[in-house]
Image: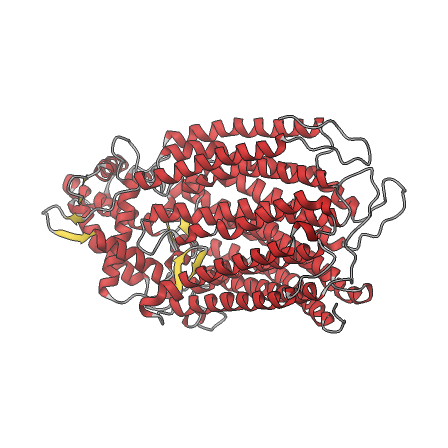
Amino acid sequence: MSVAAQPLPGEDSALSPWWLRTVLIVMVLGFTGLIVITSLAYRNVPPIPAQVLDAQGVRLFTGDDISSGQAIFLKYGLMNNGSIWGHGAYLGPDYSAEALHLIGEDTATVIAQQQYQQPLSALTPGQLAAVYAQTAVELKTNRYDAASATLHLTLPETAAYHRQIAYWTDYFLDPARNGGLKRGLIRDPTELQQFSAFVTWTAWASVANRPGENYSYTNNFPYDPHVGNTPIPDALLWSALSLIVLLGGIASVLLMFGKFDYLGWISTGQHVHPYLLPGQASAGQLALVKFFVVTALLFLAQTLVGGATAHYRADPGSFYGFQLERLFPSNLMRAWHLQTAVFWIATAYVAAALFLGRSLRNDEPRGFAGWVHLLFGAFVVVIGGSLLGEWAGISQMLGQWWFWLGNQGWEYLELGRLWQYLLIVGLLVWFAILLKLVQPDTLSEPAAKPLVRLFLLASLAIPVFYMPALFFGAKTHFTVVDTWRFWIIHLWVEGFFEFFVTTMVALMFYQLGLTQRNVALRVIYLDAILYFGGGLVGTGHHWYFTGQSSFNMALSAMASVLEVVPLTLLTLDAWDFVRTTQADCDVCRESVAIPHKWTFYFLMSVGFWNFVGAGMFGFLINLPIVSYYEVGTQLTPNHGHAAMMGVFGMLAIALMVFVLRQTSSDARWSDIEKYVKVGFWGTNVGLMLMLMVSLFPSGVLQVWDVVQHGYWHARSLDYIGSERSRLIEWLRLPGDLVFILFGAIPLVIASIKGWLDVHRQPTD
């Protein structure tokens, strides 16, 4: 890649065409690899048999029962209680691991009686080892006949299946023993039979060897040595090789930064002349402030339901003496916790994009404020309707309409299908408004056109790459669904939202006079090269153990490790952000009034949490060999909280603070600023306490229990409900309180004060 020569101080150097060409090459190669992996998922999925027979040839259940059981799993919101193949919630067990363990114990018990006429507890260590070795052979043997689409179960497996029905019937009875589900959640015998058929099938796919291989359809996940599930050699090999790729990637990029030292956000050696001045917002921009009130209120709601969700882990049977699960069971609270997070962050981004778009032109388009009001109403309908629908769906009030109007049940994509369609329509309308707003002939700064084009492309990607959420239904194969689901969770959020946010920050810095156009373009291109270079194919690191082959593991491990590279580079810009809050012009050496101190402080926290949450904690759980033991333990939400809140959440707050400052005069801002200051320290200190005191140590101890006793044990209610685990969960309370009382609440007050001030000032 050729790069232009180093510019002289004050110059905005020419931009090499190879920046754009490299982005396009990376995107083509990345999407090619991702599409190949996605298409292979359809071919390599664990088969769903048309019928399952016992040892005597009697039909136990059918493929329709398995698919209907998956729908039951979703209908009752159980992916927000436990998990399948490590994916889902952490309040309850991993259903597939629990079912596999029960099948293994039943098989071992039968073998012990046949060979030694003794129960397992009476066997010598040598006898026990022999029994479990034979158990592994029995369960690893794949008795699926592809020609007739028939799966044959052995006598012990048949007994275990019948035991599943009674086991799960008992599980759903007591909230204290299931992580806070509604008492007697599933009572219908047919639904219990179908649910048991589904989890029995997931357990079979977890242990039966894939044809032609010596490991299972899920690459021997979950870890359970008693049934022969141990790490496959590929997990160790590709973990080791990916470390070489990581070191090479870091070295290459640091070499680039060393040679071309003008790479980075902040331009030096130039006069700083902000184009954006506080207190000069238009009517349309003032109308956008109410979006940030909703942002702050949803943020507060998310923290409250998040605290309640954590309480269900500490004391699932009682909420300070009140049976909270009767009205707000744990699976509903967790669904709301995830959905409110997506909604408040997306609301802030959408509103900030319109605000920045309007600031690119001198005049305001006719009717812009009206479209802002209309879009606001649409967001309120979708957000409010989907959250109420999830409550009604999980409460079983919607009958057959649960999937369309209520709770789809897929983690992170809980909102009903109707609300998804409306959300996409709303985002397309938002893009149309943005497109009309930044027409090339209306820009106040024509030189900004290249930045605006990238801004629009990134904005269009938001509705377009949410559309894979429509590609599956309640009965679509679990492996296929999880493939498309992470097109949203990883590719949409961590890929295109990241790119979209980069273009917004670039526009903000350009309009504040802190960066030159081509400097901003280089950063955008570099960000795209680095993030998409590892992030597109790297999406597959979520699919190591969900029914895809080891080919995905090899490709994804080598690519996803590169996602850490751009995060390490954030430290190179850290001092520039600090210096910018106390800016002196590099040319005239006079102090420059940059009125966005707290915006930059929140941006600094974004960089910090990006490195810690996405970089350190993300890399910790990303390697296949680590992920094999870790996926679905508390180290996952440890990474999730640090990355989701620390990066996307802090950035959303930074944009909110930016807009509040731009729409406030100096006099009014002094009253708002003190709440923003408290909110900054409250969110960052609270998040740090939450992670360091509770989530991280809890995750480390849980992974250690996986290694010692097996995955099923570390995810069981016996472990989660142990005295030590609940103590660590209670230790999260101080961090939660700091986060809510000194983080979320002051920011709500700041947003409301900013909105009230809008109504006290005249509009253009």
Q: Is residue 635 visible?
A: no
Q: Position of residue 336 (x, y in %)?
A: 48, 63
Is 53 positioned to the left or the right of 240 in the image? left
Is 241 positioned to the left or the right of 564 in the image? left
Q: Is residue 582 visible?
A: yes
- Which image quarter: residue 526? top right
Q: Residue at x 58, y 40 (%)?
A: 615
Total number of numbered discs in the rendering? 0
Q: Quadrant of the C terminus?
A: bottom right
Is 311 positioned to the left or the right of 357 in the image? left
Identify the residue at the far front of this view: 441
Q: Position of residue 414 (x, y in %)?
A: 43, 59
- What is the image's colouring? secondary structure
Nearer-the-camera pick, 529 or 464: 464
Is 293 positioned to the left or the right of 713 in the image? right
Q: Position of residue 671 (x, y in %)?
A: 78, 67
Nearer-the-camera pick, 188 or 174: 188
Q: Position of residue 718 (x, y in %)?
A: 38, 54
Position above or below: 233 against 756 = above
